[in-house]
Amino acid sequence: MPVISTERLTKRYPGVTALESLSIDVGDGVTGLVGANGAGKSTLIKILLGLTGATSGGARVLGHDIDTEGLALRSRVGYMPEHDCLPGDVSATELVVHLARMSGLPTSAARERAADTLRHVGLYEERYRPIGGYSTGMKQRVKLAQALVHDPDVVFLDEPTNGLDPAGRDEMLALVRRIYTDFGISVLVTSHLLGELERICDNVVIIDGGTLLRSSSVADFTRSSAQLALEVVAEPATALAALRAAGLEVTRDGLLLLVELAGDETYDLVRDVVADHGLGLVRLEPRRHHIAEVFDEEATRVAR
Ligand SMILES: Nc1ncnc2c1ncn2[C@@H]1O[C@H](COP(=O)(O)OP(=O)(O)OP(=O)(O)O)[C@@H](O)[C@H]1O
């Protein structure tokens, strides 16, 4: 059973279509929901949580219908909102214990779970300080802790790396990955930065202007766009011409020549061209596209 499935989900605000007939299936693991600002990521999460209704279409989360089983669904889901929404005058412990109790945990279990979760997100030492004095990174961790405290089956994390410096981003991304690897909790995580999701996700769903551009595993995404990176001693322009004359599809990226990989025979053809023209092989290796490049190409194609 998919963790999330949507069926022709559409959401219109006055003058804006935030989602347009979006049909996706999201399985176990860490799934990245990627799109530029305004692509519809937050809207999708809010609809899945029942915080706002869809204009048409439907969706299920963990098999629960969003229209008729909202309570059951929300009891199994954790949510980390995008914007700063934390009270400044209470400590992380007070807030997370409170939210754990709101989720139905008895007081002692709520305290225990809150302490465990705050330790897990790296906030154990500072847990009794008022949140108002926390850095952005610490506040993001509080938001993450409250999403996890009731031991959900899936969490929706809306831009968890927002506002963080590069080191903070890396730490947050590692934490997000561990939610699944350590606890088996599936994750739907949004970002407009494709490169960072590529590092931690099993699957990616890419939306643009509320429509689905692509949904696939990260491995499939990058495999399907494999190229060979070639570096030679000769002038790249000379090598480019020779490779193209041999019928290969080649582009240039600085000193590198990127040859579209049609199959194993591409290796042989490149080797022969390099040898026949005395180009002097420096290196020849498979190069994987980053998702961002594929996304850019697909977005350009859609825009045309
Ligand atoms: N309550 C609302 N009323 C009117 N328009 C809205 C509302 N919420 C979102 N929108 C519009 O719907 C579109 C999608 O917004 P959404 O917040 O879902 O995008 P997003 O991908 O999460 O982007 P961001 O990362 O900037 O939040 C945008 O054009 C936005 O302006």
Image: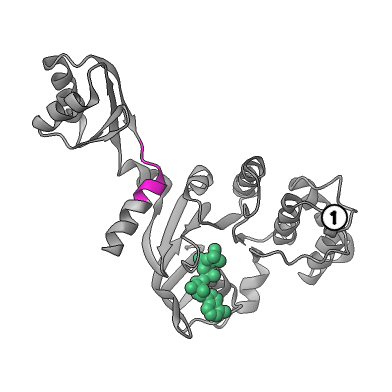
The reply, left or right, for residue 233 in relation to residue 61 is left
* Residue 137 drawn at (x, y percent): 72, 50
**Neighbour tally class for label 1: few under 14, some 14-19, many 20 plus, Cα within 10 Å:** few
- In this view of the protein, which residue sits in the foreground, 5 or 188? 188
Estimate the x, y position of residue 115 in percent, counting from the top left. 84, 52
Horizontal side of residue 70 vs 139, given as left or right: left
The chosen color scheme is one colour
Query: Residue 48 magenta-drawn?
Result: no
Q: Position of residue 156 (x, y in %)?
A: 60, 62
Query: Residue 185, can we see it?
Result: yes
Q: Position of residue 273 (x, y in %)?
A: 14, 21
Classify the position of the C terminus by image quarter.
Answer: bottom left
Answer whether residue 61 is visible to the viewer in this image.
Answer: no
Residue at 47% over, 50% down = 194
Residue at image point 71% right, 55% down: 140
Q: Nearer the viewer, residue 211 or 162?
A: 162
Figure label count: 1
Residue segment shown in magenta: 288-294
Residue 20 lies in quadrant: bottom left
Residue that carries the numbered disc 1 in the rendered image: 133
Query: Which of the 4 image quarters holds residue 85?
Result: bottom right
Q: Amino acid at mark 1?
A: Gly
